[in-house]
Amino acid sequence: GGANDLTESSAGLHNLDRVKWHDAFAGVMSCDEPGKVMFEDIARSHSVLDSYTSEAAKGTLWHVNLFPNYATQRQLYYRVNSGDLPEGGYTYEQYVSEYMSVVKPKVLSYDYYPCQGKTGNLSSGYFDNMAIIRRYAAESNVPFWVYIQACSFGGLSRLPSEGDLLWQVNTALCYGAKGIQYFCGVTPSDGGGEKFVGSLFDRDGNRTEIYDYAKRANLQIAAVD
């Protein structure tokens, strides 16, 4: 839905009333992979959420996760593959730069899923993407978080091996990532032409072998931290 669905919905605010005092409440995932045209609404929604939860939830995070650099220019601009682009197009660096200047996030989060094709193959734009994210996070003095591919989907991506998962974690730590997230935690329902295999838990809530990979990786991350 739209970035400000939550703040414009009495039902959404009622749901916040139910959870905002809970010890486990850490914030709201307000939008995943927004387009540029949504940035002002996201910033406005975060201001509303801050004022609404200020007494109950100091330090909460209004979380947004950005597209990777292999998204199309129209996705970066509109979130969907339609609409006219500005003259000269719209680059990934413009996308990240405008997000940082408009939304002013507490954390810069993005996803990039590099395990494509046969075992051993990795997408070539992985480090380029991370370098851009690292630079804009450093310029704004905020940490950056990255999603780790923990499943296969969409036909070309493969189910990561433990080596694939650890390679992603360790390269992210080397680049200075402060948050490691996994896509997905629970195997999503198939839809939109995508069939999901893997994730930390299956659709019935059972742990998978990917859970064991992530658990061992997290013990290593904790040791490094």
Image (spheres, rainbow, N blue to C red):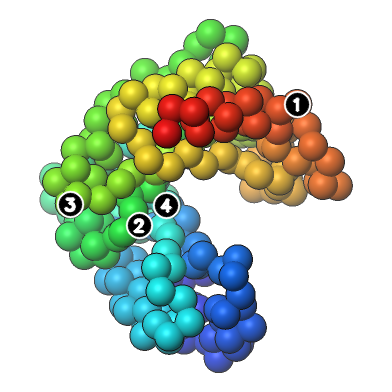
Give the quarter of the image for residue 53. Answer: bottom left
Q: Quadrant of the C terminus?
A: top left
Q: CA distance from mark 3 to mark 2?
A: 20 Å
Secondary-structure class at tag 2: loop
Q: Amino acid at mark 2?
A: Gly
The numbered mark, 3 or 1, whose residue comes first in the sequence reads 3
Q: Who's the residue at 37% across and 40% down the image? A: 178
Q: Nearer the viewer, mark 1 or mark 4?
A: 1
Q: Amino acid at mark 1?
A: Glu
Secondary-structure class at tag 3: helix
Q: Who's the residue at 79% across and 37% down the image? A: 207
Q: Which residue is mark 1?
A: 209
Expressed as whole percent of the image width and height from the top left, the position of residue 49 reads 41, 79
Q: Who's the residue at 55% across and 91% down the image? A: 10
Expressed as whole percent of the image width and height from the top left, the position of residue 222 reads 50, 33
Q: CA distance from mark 1 to mark 4?
A: 26 Å
CB under 8 Å between discs 1 and 4: no
Q: Nearer the viewer, mark 3 or mark 4?
A: 3
Q: Amino acid at mark 4?
A: Asn
Q: Which residue is mark 2?
A: 35
